[in-house]
Amino acid sequence: MTTNDDGIAGSVAPTTTGRALLAALVAVSFALPPSPTAAQSRPLSFVRDAETEALLGDYARPIFKAAGIQAKDVRLVLVSSREFNAFIIDGGRIFMNTGVLMDAATPNEVIGVLAHETGHIAGAHQVRFREAVARARNMALIGAVLGGAAMAGSIRSGGGGQAGQAGAAVLTGSASLANATLMAYARTEEIAADRAALNYLEKSGQSAEGMLVTFRRFADQMLVANQGRDPYAFTHPMPRERISQIEDLAVKSKFHGRKDPPELQARHDLMRAKLTAFMDNPRTVGGKFPATDTSLAARYARAVVAYRQNQPTDAIRLTDELIREHPTNAYFHELKGQTLLEWGKPREALAPLRRAVDLASGPAGAPIRVMLGHALVATEDKGLADEAIRQLTIAADRDRLDPSPYQHLARAHAMKGDLPKADLMVATGLFVAGNAKEARKYAARARDNLKAGSADWLRADDIVSYKPDE
């Protein structure tokens, strides 16, 4: 499991006339969106975990099918945040906070969240919402022009304060009207996403009980946090209202009350334990999974905590016990390999990581391949450079938005003495990470030393020639 702190590009800084509208630009969200100020000042931190990504993919696949969406066209992105929230920014990604996965007791609760966000994507709400934002902004700007003209006219005429007050009223009123119009539109889209989610759950033979559990949680939170606030100031319908609407439709479903399959619940429990052990304070984790709890999930959590607390001997012992009981669980092998790698024993990490790669089939296994590639180059054994390049290239091809394989690919090519290719890998990693300026420097150096017209030369030239859209 790995994290990074790359921010998301495309955020909009607040202006005097647009601050009230900014919340709408942040995301179309399952829960209440973050405040505009927080959203602008705090970059998102992402988490990569093969186990969690594979499970989320299994949760989402029947929902996407019901919505008529190709699973390959939507990327599920884990955000390192304890808040219970999920959101979309565009039509190709669903961002889910780890807090959703850590708090959701059942797969069905997470599936309900995914169904709602899929409703936004299928309805192209992010596109239509931006259009609504543009209209609202124009409404506010027109009011600003008219109000400014009224106040300027008052100043030029030397008149009293009434004209100026009228101008100020136009400014305030137009901004309030624009904001209210936009919030009403957002609430309409949220209701549409709720109804779409119920339809997807029905078509895929699943209960909506998880959605109800989630909305009840929101209702309790909002009751405490937002007493006395105007319900029309929210971009989402009030949870009690949404609960009533969902209940009316959910109880009519022939799948109402259907439980998650036991094997899926077991995977969910392991995933929750792992995320909790990695992300919560170890003391808190110990309280949730005391030594008296001998469940598989609890023992998994304690193995992760031992790894986090730099107790590799205990971590390996606990992980080996898990592997003996469940030898085909890829992620137990992955944890053992990660512990050995970060303990400074990369060569010993190779066997469990190779086994984990063999067991974790599909695109979701890419982070494990990256870890294996890292271990291979960390041995500093030139004889392992080709295997590292092979594994890291597969990982990069399966996840073209992940910059992490390229730093290890650069080391692997350098081990073979191919410095131009190493420079190209550094440049590619920087480019994927969004640092085009630094990427061009390495790409230019690579291009100068690669065979003109070759595939690698063309890749380097593309990076050097890249100009971001204005």
Image (cartoon, rainbow, N blue to C red):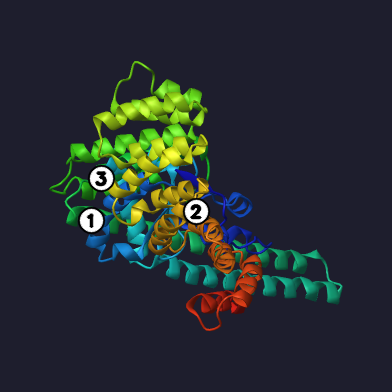
For the point 49% across and 52% down, which residue is it? 234
Q: Quadrant of the C terminus?
A: bottom right
Q: Which residue in the structure is indicated by mark 2? A: 382
* Residue 182 position within the rendered picture, expressed as x and y whole percent measured from the top left: 50, 63
Give the label, 2 or 1, closer to the camera: 2
Real-space CA distance between mark 3 and mark 2, rounded to the nearest whole angstrom: 62 Å
Say which residue appears at 40% left-offset and 37% top-offset. Answer: 335
- State left or right for residue 359 relative to residue 416: left
**Nearest the eye: 96 or 138:** 96
Residue 228 picture location, percent across and down: 52, 40
**Residue 62 disc label:** 1
Q: Is residue 42 above or below residue 146?
A: above
State the SS at label 1: helix
Residue 123 lies, in percent from the top left, at 34, 66
Q: Kindly report which numbered mark, 3 or 2, lies closer to the viewer in this rendering.
A: 2
Q: Amino acid at mark 3?
A: Glu
From the viewer's perspective, is residue 91 above or below residue 225?
below
Disc 3, SS: helix
16 with respect to 103 (left or right): right
Q: Earlier in the sequence, mark 3 or mark 2?
A: 3
Q: Residues within 10 Å of mark 2 (few under 14, many from 20)?
A: some
Q: Are marks 2 and 1 in contact (CB under 8 Å)?
A: no
| Secondary structure under the numbered disc 2 in the rendered image | helix
On screen, residue 76 versus residue 55, left or right, reads right
Q: Residue furthest right?
A: 158
- Please name the amino acid that badge 1 sits on: Pro
How far apart in space, not on screen, are marks 1 and 3 (Cα)?
22 Å
* Crowd tier of the residue under label 3, counting other residues whose Cα lies within 10 Å: few below 14, some 14–19, many 20 or above: some
Which residue does the image show at 46% across and 62% down from the upper left?
A: 401
Q: Which residue is mark 3?
A: 247
Foreground pick, 7 / 410: 410
Compute the Cα span from label 2 to label 1.
45 Å
